[in-house]
Amino acid sequence: MLQYVFGVISLGLIYVIATTGLAVFTGFTGLFSLGHAAFFAIGAYTAAILTYFYGWNFYLALLAGAAAGGLVGFLIGYPTLKAKLRTDYFAIATLGFGEAVRVLLENLPITQGARGLPGIRGDTNLPVLLVASAIVIWAAWNLIHSRHGRAAIAIREDFVAAEMMGVDIFMGRLRSLTFSAACAGLAGGLFAHYFCFIQPSMFTAYMSTQMTAAVVAGGMGSISGPVIATLIFIGIPEALRVANIWRLVAYGLLLVLIMAFRPQGLMGYRELSLDLFKGWFRRPGKGGKP
Amino acid sequence: MFFQTLVTGLAIGGIYALMAVGYSLVFSVLNFSNFAYGSIIMLGAYIAYFAMVKLGAPIWIALILSIVGAATLCFLNERLAYSPLRKRRASSLFFMISAMGTAIFLENLVYALIGAHFYSFPEVFTRTNLSFHGVAIGVLDVFAIVFSSVSIYALHMFLQKSRTGIAIRAASYDIQVCSLNGVNNSALIGLVFALAGALAGVSGTFLGMKYIVYPTMGWITNKAYIAAVIGGLGSLPGAVVGGILLGVLETFVSAYVSSVVRDVFSFSLLVLLLLVMPTGLFGRYLEEKV
């Protein structure tokens, strides 16, 4: 029983790492990625191939996975963000990128196609996950409270005004995307060494949807909100033993309901703190800012 | 071989064009990408299938039922999911999240309730081909091309000649001024969604007959969306040209290169085109409004 609870917590923490990255990107630039599962997959395959075929050290492989995710994020982000694609164009471009990665993984010899990689070393354990998620949340926190973070918030709120104030929109978005892709890559490496088996069909739209839903439900512009939302999303269905398919139905409905009734999400531009509880029962402001 | 590929491409392009027009119609008025449209098309296909198999309806009745059903669903989608956002004047980002939520919700609801079975339509049109100078074309394809053209032409005449059509075109330029001139915006938007839904019914039925009916068949509509972007979102002639162009190009790629890279090709084409020509072929300048 205890082992089962630890298992759920471990899975939750893996998703927390990836979702924190997405929260930095989507929540602080207002751009949507429908292909984050692809960065996750790139990290998972890079780390797994390095330990599986080349016998690398686990931690080095994790770093390599994160670096590979970040690098691909940078390479994808450079042309698409340079072109200042509209939010919806960017979303469909990332969807296509996710599809391209899946096709590649299914056809490359080193990934062994749809058969996947069985028997990866099971090096991921709870302490590793706790340390990794603490580092990622700390890094994300520092990033959004830095000069870069303030610039990113300015871009999200009003990018014309931000540009006039001298904020480099392109670099701001690219940095956020690279960071978030690296987080997804790190989570992927941990995921691969936790389940000891990966195959391309694991990294589907389901994964991207769950991350996006957690960021929106937790509140765009918050780090603690998406983290809490992720733990709820992993924990409650596990506790209730709901079939996967009904989870997705609920995520979809949740997105629609949140947009209609509480667009600021759970935390909405705020962080978990004592002040929050004082104002817990105050009515939120009318409407939501984008 | 060349002409055969061309004819096959045209047949697919016709259906893409029909779906792309639906995307563009909604975009031209509300300025957001209705990602829920794909699942409405999928439901249209299910309605036609069940009408034919369970009710034993002939194809004409099934087509009409599918048109009415999909139009109703699309209308309800607007009233339930988008109209609260519209009243709040939310940014197009919120509309897009809500649309994604609707798509995820409907798709997985079908999975959960009907299951992931593949249904194929009963044979209405004999699978014989018409042969013309050595180029074979299916009877279904001919029928689909003719019916698509008729629907698009009817829509075009409606938009050009009728009073309501003029109001819709006015709204696509400036919805606020349109309402100042005495147009009931809420009714107009409802009608636009119902029209788009009717097109979804037609394209869903043909898509189902040509391929197969299953919950994620809405994935094909992503390519219709790409077609709409290629033509310039919001432009109806652009959507038609984009649809046919994409259908033909794609068929050539799968015939002469490889069918594995076909979808990747479509998405890369989209990104490339947006880099050099952000407005598409016939689009207006579309920078996102702050």
Image: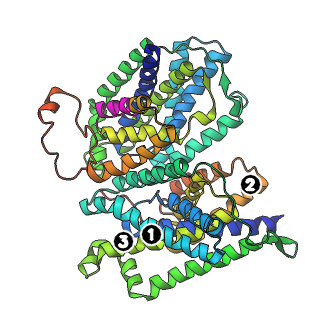
**Helix or strand or loop: what does disc 1 sit on?**
helix
How far is disc 1 from disc 3 in space, using C-alphas? 13 Å
**Helix or strand or loop: what does disc 3 sit on?**
helix
> Mostly what secondary structure, the magenta segment?
helix
- Residue B277 visible in the shown view: no
| Foreground of the two, B125 or A57 | B125
| Foreground of the two, B183 or A249 | A249
Q: Give the vertical position of B150 relative to A93 (above or below).
A: below
Mark 1 packing: few (<14 Cα in 10 Å), some, or many (20+)?
some
Residue type at mark 3: give it: Ile
Q: Where is residue B227 shown, x and y percent of the image?
A: 57, 62
Mark 2 packing: few (<14 Cα in 10 Å), some, or many (20+)?
some
Front tag of 2 and 1: 1
Q: Give the vertical position of A83 relative to A29 (above or below).
A: below
Q: Where is residue B258 shown, x and y percent of the image?
A: 75, 49
Q: Which chain does the residue under circle 2 lie in?
A: B
- Residue B33 visible in the shown view: yes
Q: Residue at x 38, y 41 (%)?
A: A26
Q: Which residue is mark 1?
A: B72
Residue type at mark 1: give it: Thr
Q: Which residues are magenta?
A: A222-233
Q: Where is residue B19 shown, x and y percent of the image?
A: 55, 66
Residue type at mark 2: give it: Ser
Determine if the magenta segment contains residue B76. no
Q: Which residue is mark 2?
A: B254
**Helix or strand or loop: what does disc 2 sit on?**
helix
Mark 3 packing: few (<14 Cα in 10 Å), some, or many (20+)?
many
Lower sequence index among marks 3 and 2:
3
Lower sequence index among marks 1 and 3:
1
